[in-house]
Image (spheres, rainbow, N blue to C red):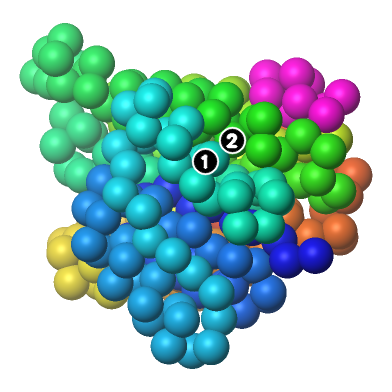
Amino acid sequence: MTKTAVITGGGRGFGKAFGHALAAEGYHAVLVDIDGAEAEAAAAEIRALGHSAEGLAGDVTDEARMAAVMEQAAAPHGGIDVLVNNAGLHSDEYGKPITTLGMAKMRRLFDVNVMGVVGCTLAALPHMKGRAGASIVNISSSAAHMGGSPYGDSKLAVAALGITFARELAPDGIRVNAISPGLILTETIRNELPEATKARVKAMQMLQGDGEERHIVDALLFLVSDKAAFITGETLRVTGGMAAGV
């Protein structure tokens, strides 16, 4: 039976990398992005490598559209086996003080980063019940464990939702976990993050190597695999020790 994985925010960055990795593992990868053309371009790259993928346009805050997306994603192979709630707002803008952001931007931040996770999970749920090994992975952030930013607050909520959904969906055989990436030197981060900021964050790490995209991809592949069959409700911090805590 071919398995299906849905990845939100799949047109670029981590989402695109997740799509490539899951497709290489034999999944039909459905990349969902607010930029439908970008999602389809990413899916075309995967197909060019001989794997199965499609790109769909969708805003995670649009409840009706997400229901339609999940139904379309589930149709070819009878359901959804993996959901990666990756879409989120994460620019420097949302690291500003709440008193600067104001209500409208705070509402937008939580609509996408938090309610988007809720909406996509609920939309995928009917298509995941009864699928052996079904797994949901939410992408949180090391900022969730550090405190002090609206973005981090939204990602702390994402990690907490993993526990709540893990408890609620366990009777359906669905595991729910989260990944909190630290400083991961993707091409975008290498080009856009000031060197002083990179140095400051790296100084907080216990491990002094560079965090790479593959570290997050490997964490995802572990959490959706049978090797993690007895793991649910957990947040895996992939931060080089920067955000270690109990």
The reply to whether callout 2 and callout 1 are in contact (CB within 8 Å) is yes
Residue, disc 1: 70
Residue 245 quadrant: top right
Picture quadrant where residue 217 is located:
bottom right
Q: Is residue 71 left or right of residue 225?
A: left
The reply to whether the magenta stretch includes residue 168 is yes
Above or below for 134 versus 185:
above
Calculate the distance from the C-alpha at mark 2 to the C-alpha at mark 1.
6 Å
Q: Quadrant of the N terminus?
A: bottom right
Where 172 falls versus 243 (above or below)? above
Residue at 40%, 71% in the rendered image: 43
Q: Which mark is residue 120?
A: none
Dot 1 alpha-carbon crowd within 10 angstroms: few under 14, some 14 to 19, many 20 or more: many
Which of the two residues, 119 or 94, is positioned nearer the viewer here?
Answer: 119
- For residue 154, say whether it is visible: no
Q: Secondary structure at mark 1?
A: helix
Q: Which residue is mark 2?
A: 124
Q: Percent position (x, y) of residue 142? A: 47, 43
Q: Residue at x 73, y 66 (%)?
A: 2
The amino acid type of the residue labelled 1 equals Met
Name the spot of residue 174 as percent of width and height, x first: 78, 36
Q: Tell me the chief SS of the magenta region.
A: helix
Classify mark 2: residues with Cα within 10 Å, few (<14), some (14-19) or many (20+): many
The region drawn magenta spans: 163-172
Relative to 76, say whether 152 is above or below. above
Q: Amino acid at mark 2?
A: Ala
Please indicate whether residue 35 sits to the left or right of residue 222 in the image: left
